[in-house]
Image (spheres, rainbow, N blue to C red):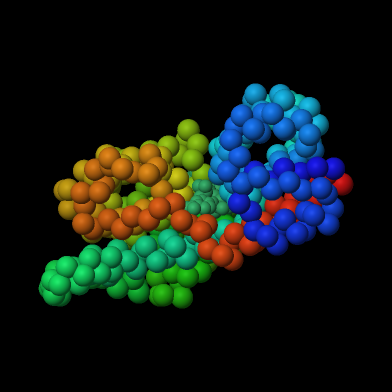
């Protein structure tokens, strides 16, 4: 059988695949080229790009599996694959630790003004008084979405002396307590957290789940962390909440529009912005490559 690797996946994963299949690696391949060769392949592996759209799937007469190394299947027409009897697999657990570490890093960066202190120091401005921060120890962390990443950040926050509360309606209270957090409803989480961190999938029910109404209910000086998906927070509402002084600062890895070139968020000094790099570690990428190779082998055997 033949596999097309259409993205940059870890060498360890490619070696695994080569033991089982004929493998063609074509990173950065154009849509036109995929369209012209896809019928020769039994499986295709991608990352967040390229998109596997209906027209590609229809051309893939021999396709049996579409594999996305990493989380999220936004770039795969899953319904069309299912209709054509093509399996869709991914490796969502590969980056859970890395994303949680980034979220934790953003919490510290905001609470201790790390990015701003760096900027001022480079500008040769020694302004210690403006860099007074807050400890995380003893504060309440509200975790929205207590899945793989949410539980990992909970573990890290607990080690730092934080109290954990979590909102995750699909989980039972016992499951949340077993992960070390107190289960609460969204309103209680919003009203009582000193830091709120978001780890839910983006769906119609979670789009803008943090907007003006929620910001109004929050404690003053709350810190907001989002490493999930941009649309979960209403960015205009976040800007309003920062302008009013309600929000102390925010750490954001994801944006409603990426890259956020024209975002109003860029005007705020108390926002730490990263470039959707939650999964960008050597460990997570190696794990994603190996896991996706295993998934493809399982799907085709
Ligand atoms: P997961 O599926 O393990 O956990 C998500 C949790 O959210 C689940 O426990 C689910 O029950 C809960 N949930 C679903 N709907 C909810 C709702 N309306 N309210 C509260 N909880 C709800 O997912 P994960 O691997 O922990 O990933 C979490 C998020 O992180 C996803 O949005 C994912 O896309 C994102 N992510 C970002 C990066 C990055 O690079 N920044 C990398 C990987 C994942």
Q: Position of residue 71 (x, y in %)?
A: 58, 48
Q: Is residue 257 above or below residue 271?
A: above
Q: Residue at x 22, y 66 (%)?
A: 119
Q: Residue at x 49, y 62 (%)?
A: 100
Q: Position of residue 254 (x, y in %)?
A: 41, 48
On the picture, is 147 further left or further right than 126?
Answer: right
Q: Nearer the viewer, residue 162 or 199?
A: 199
Q: Is residue 263 above or below residue 291?
A: above
Labels in figure, total:
0
Q: Is residue 103 above or below residue 237?
A: below
Q: Position of residue 211 (x, y in %)?
A: 32, 40
Q: Is residue 27 visible?
A: yes
Q: Residue at x 72, y 33 (%)?
A: 38
- Quadrant, the N terminus: top right
Q: Position of residue 47 (x, y in %)?
A: 59, 46
Q: Residue at x 23, y 58 (%)?
A: 270
């Amino acid at each position: 059988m033949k596999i097309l690797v259409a993205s940059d996946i870890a060498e360890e994963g490619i070696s695994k695949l080569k033991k089982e299949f004929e493998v063609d690696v074509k990173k950065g391949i154009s849509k036109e080229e995929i369209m012209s060769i896809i019928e020769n392949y039994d499986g295709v592996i991608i990352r967040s790009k390229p998109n596997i759209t209906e027209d590609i799937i229809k051309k893939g007469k021999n396709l049996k599996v579409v594999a996305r190394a990493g989380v999220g299947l936004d770039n795969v027409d899953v319904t069309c694959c299912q209709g054509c009897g093509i399996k869709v697999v991914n490796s969502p657990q590969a980056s859970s630790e890395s994303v949680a570490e980034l979220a934790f890093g953003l919490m510290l960066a905001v609470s201790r003004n790390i990015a701003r202190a760096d900027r001022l120091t480079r500008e040769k401005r020694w302004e210690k008084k403006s860099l007074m921060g807050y400890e995380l120890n003893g504060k309440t962390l509200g975790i929205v979405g207590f899945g793989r990443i949410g539980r990992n950040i909970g573990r890290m926050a607990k080690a730092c002396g934080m109290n954990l509360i979590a909102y995750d309606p699909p989980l039972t209270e016992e499951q949340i307590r077993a992960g070390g957090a107190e289960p609460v409803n969204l309103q209680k989480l919003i009203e009582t957290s000193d830091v709120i961190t978001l780890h839910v999938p983006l769906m119609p029910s979670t789009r803008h789940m943090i907007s003006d109404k929620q910001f109004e209910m929050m404690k003053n000086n709350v810190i907001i962390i989002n490493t999930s998906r941009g649309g979960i927070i209403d960015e205009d509402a976040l800007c309003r909440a920062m302008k009013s002084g309600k929000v102390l600062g925010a750490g954001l890895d994801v944006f409603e529009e990426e890259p956020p070139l024209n975002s109003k968020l860029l005007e705020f000094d108390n926002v730490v912005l990263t470039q959707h790099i939650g999964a960008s570690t050597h460990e997570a990428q190696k794990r994603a490559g190996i896991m996706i190779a295993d998934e493809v082998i399982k799907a085709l055997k």
